[in-house]
Every structure is written in C-alpha cells, then in structure tokens.
Image (cartoon, rainbow, N blue to C red):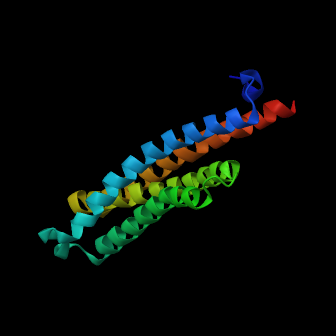
C-alpha cells in the first residue's frame, strides 16, 4: 500500500474516522487481553507460599512489574471512560487520537512489564546471569519489535514522501 492509502480509499473524513476507530478497538482488544492475563497472574503471585522466600531484588522486581502492568491496564481502559463522558459531543477525532497515544504509551509499560516478569522467573529458576541475559534480550527484542521496527518504517515512509 502506498503512502497515499487514504486518498486511494476514496473515503470521507467521517468514514476514515470510523475505520480508524474500528482498527483501534481491535488493537486495544489484543493488547488488553495480554495485559489482563499477565495482571491476573501477578495478582495471585504474592499469595503463593513461595513468595516469602523471594530475595529482596525479586520482590522489588515483582512490585515494579506489577505497577507497570497496572499502569498499562489503566492507560488502555482510559479511552473508554473518556468516550462515555464525551459521548455524542462530536469528539470522535479527539478520542481516536487520544486512544492511539495512550495505547502506544501502554505498550511501553507492557514492554517493561513483560521484561520484568521474565527477569523474575529467570532469576528464581536459573539465577542472576540468566535473568540479566533474558532481561536484556526481552527488553531489546520487545522494544525493537514493537517500537523500533514500525518507527523505522514510519521514518522511511516520511523520507519517501519528501522525495
């Protein structure tokens, strides 16, 4: 698809906004499911009998991870309440833009949360060296996959458009 995809669609601004809303809702559903599962897992961990035996580092890692996932969940839920409070006020473009930005920020917190839980599990099972290796790979891998790759494509499209 070319850089002028919306022009080729021959859609009105309202139709484009409706399509963007549907696409964003689908993306929120995917991200929301992952966050819900991880958050549920994290909520039950402290009630496991082995939690008391975790090192101070592991408990700190757990808590920071829990906070990251909680913030990600809050960011993904926020557009719903904004929508309810602004319903039928002609704010769809604002809401789509806001939800888009909140989703991107939420994915940053989800990256940190995924990395944190992988570090915790690796440290408990295999030790510090494995936890560091897994943490670095997860952090770089997720950041690259979720942010660097699409941002590099976005930059390339901007360069193509300027030529």
Determine whether, in the image, residue 42 is placed left or right of residue 116. left
- Position above or below: 5 against 55: above
- Residue at 55 percent across and 52 percent down: it is 103
Q: How many marks?
A: 0
User: In front here: 74 or 159?
Assistant: 74
Question: Can you name the residue that lies furthest to the left here?
Answer: 49
Quadrant location of the N terminus in the rendered image: top right
- Residue at 41 percent across and 59 percent down: it is 113
Determine whether, in the image, residue 43 is placed left or right of residue 64. left
- Residue at 58 percent across and 46 percent down: it is 147
Residue 42's x, y, as percent? 29, 62
Evaluate whether residue 138 shows in this view: yes
Determine whether, in the image, residue 135 is placed left or right of residue 146. left
- Position above or below: 18 against 137: above
Residue 73's x, y, as percent? 44, 59
- Position above or below: 51 against 1: below
User: In front here: 25 or 51?
Assistant: 25
Residue 45's x, y, as percent? 22, 65
Quadrant location of the C terminus in the rendered image: top right
Q: Quadrant of residue 144?
A: top right
User: In front here: 77 or 31?
Assistant: 77
Evaluate whether residue 3 shows in this view: no
Question: Can you name the residue that lies furthest to the right here?
Answer: 163
Residue 138's x, y, as percent? 42, 50
Q: Quadrant of residue 66?
A: bottom left
- Residue at 46 percent across and 53 percent down: it is 139
- Position above or below: 137 against 11: below
């Amino acid at each position: 698809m070319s850089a002028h995809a919306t022009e080729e669609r021959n859609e009105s601004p309202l139709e484009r906004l409706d399509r963007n809303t549907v696409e964003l809702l689908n993306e929120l559903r995917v991200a929301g499911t992952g966050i819900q599962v991880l958050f549920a897992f994290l909520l039950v961990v402290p009630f496991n009998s082995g939690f008391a035996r975790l090192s101070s580092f592991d408990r700190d890692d757990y808590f920071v991870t829990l906070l990251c996932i909680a913030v990600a969940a809050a960011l993904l839920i926020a557009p719903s309440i904004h929508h309810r409070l602004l319903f039928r006020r002609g704010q769809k473009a604002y809401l789509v833009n806001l939800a888009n930005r909140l989703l991107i920020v939420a994915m940053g917190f989800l990256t940190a949360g995924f990395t944190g839980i992988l570090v915790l599990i690796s440290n408990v099972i295999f030790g510090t060296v494995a936890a560091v290796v897994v943490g670095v790979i997860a952090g770089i891998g997720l950041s690259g996959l979720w942010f660097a790759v699409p941002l590099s494509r976005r930059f390339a499209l901007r360069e193509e458009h300027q030529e």
